[in-house]
């Protein structure tokens, strides 16, 4: 369980958010500003959906309790969205025909991760599935939007630097946004403390 918990932390914001910004930089350099901004829009939307679910639960105890969901898993969402798009872009540097196979492999790998790692450590299975679903839909929307663009010309130095940045952040202590979300939820709701999972 400890080993799984350590692995799950790589899907948190300490690694995934810098990776998402690296993706934006690659798109800016290798495709267009428009597609880079589209990526940031998709990313922010997915983060907002997860963040709002956490604020609603932490502040007011609101969740999809009949489905066993208090909040949507940010770790599962991050993995399914950011890792899948990162893999997709890297594979397209080799051959654009790898776009769709890379999408499939990325989603299969990250769903396996969400079910076998996220769901066994920091979230109940329904919450991990919900987060994975959000990330997968966002990834598919973005990759399908990419089909009219040639993103296979990201400069090699930018690729190398971007991967080095992701590796550097993966070696740093891992943090989450939970304290910030607790503060926002308490401030908005006026509750004395944030709601917590019963389990």
Image (spheres, grey):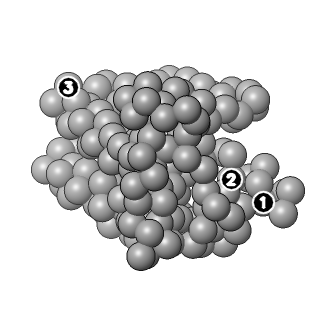
Query: For the residue carrying disc 3, how many other residues have a C-alpha within 10 Å: few (<14), some (14-19), or many (20+)?
Result: some
Q: Is residue 179 left or right of residue 88?
A: right
Asked which quadrant contains residue 102, the reply is: bottom left
Q: Is label 1 in contact with label 2 (beta carbons under 8 Å)?
A: yes
Q: Label for residue 4? A: 1
Residue at left offset 52%, top offset 27%? 183
Q: Residue most toward the right?
A: 2
Asked which quadrant contains residue 139, the reply is: bottom left
Residue at left offset 41%, top offset 60%? 63
Quadrant location, the N terminus:
bottom right
Determine if residue 83 is in view: no
Place of residue 71 in the rendered image (x, y in percent of width and height, measured from the top left): 47, 56
Q: Is residue 173 left or right of residue 75?
A: right
Q: CA distance from mark 3 to mark 2?
A: 32 Å
Quadrant location, the C terminus:
bottom right
Q: CA distance from mark 1 to mark 3?
A: 38 Å
Looking at the picture, tell me which residue is in the foreground, 6 or 166.
6
Q: Secondary structure at mark 1?
A: helix
Q: Secondary structure at mark 2?
A: helix
Q: Is label 3 in contact with label 2 (beta carbons under 8 Å)?
A: no
Q: Is 30 located above or below residue 125 in the figure?
A: above
Q: Is 146 located above or below residue 191 in the figure?
A: below
Q: Is label 1 in contact with label 3 (beta carbons under 8 Å)?
A: no
């Amino acid at each position: 369980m400890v080993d799984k918990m350590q692995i799950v932390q790589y899907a948190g914001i300490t690694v995934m958010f810098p990776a998402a910004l690296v993706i934006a930089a690659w798109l800016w350099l290798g495709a267009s500003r428009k597609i880079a901004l589209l990526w940031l829009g998709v990313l922010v939307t997915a983060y907002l959906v997860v963040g709002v679910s956490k604020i609603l639960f932490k502040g007011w105890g609101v969740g999809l309790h009949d489905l066993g969901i208090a909040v949507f898993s940010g770790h599962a969402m991050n993995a399914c969205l950011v890792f899948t798009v990162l893999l997709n872009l890297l594979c397209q540097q080799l051959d654009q025909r790898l776009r769709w196979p890379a999408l499939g492999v990325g989603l299969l790998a990250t769903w396996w991760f969400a079910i076998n790692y996220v769901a066994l450590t920091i979230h109940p299975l329904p919450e991990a599935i919900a987060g994975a679903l959000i990330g997968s839909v966002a990834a598919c929307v973005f990759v399908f939007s990419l089909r009219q663009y040639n993103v296979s010309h990201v400069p090699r130095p930018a690729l190398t630097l971007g991967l080095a940045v992701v590796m550097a952040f993966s070696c740093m202590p891992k943090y989450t946004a939970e304290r910030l979300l607790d503060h926002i939820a308490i401030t908005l709701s006026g509750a004395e403390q944030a709601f917590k999972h019963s389990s």
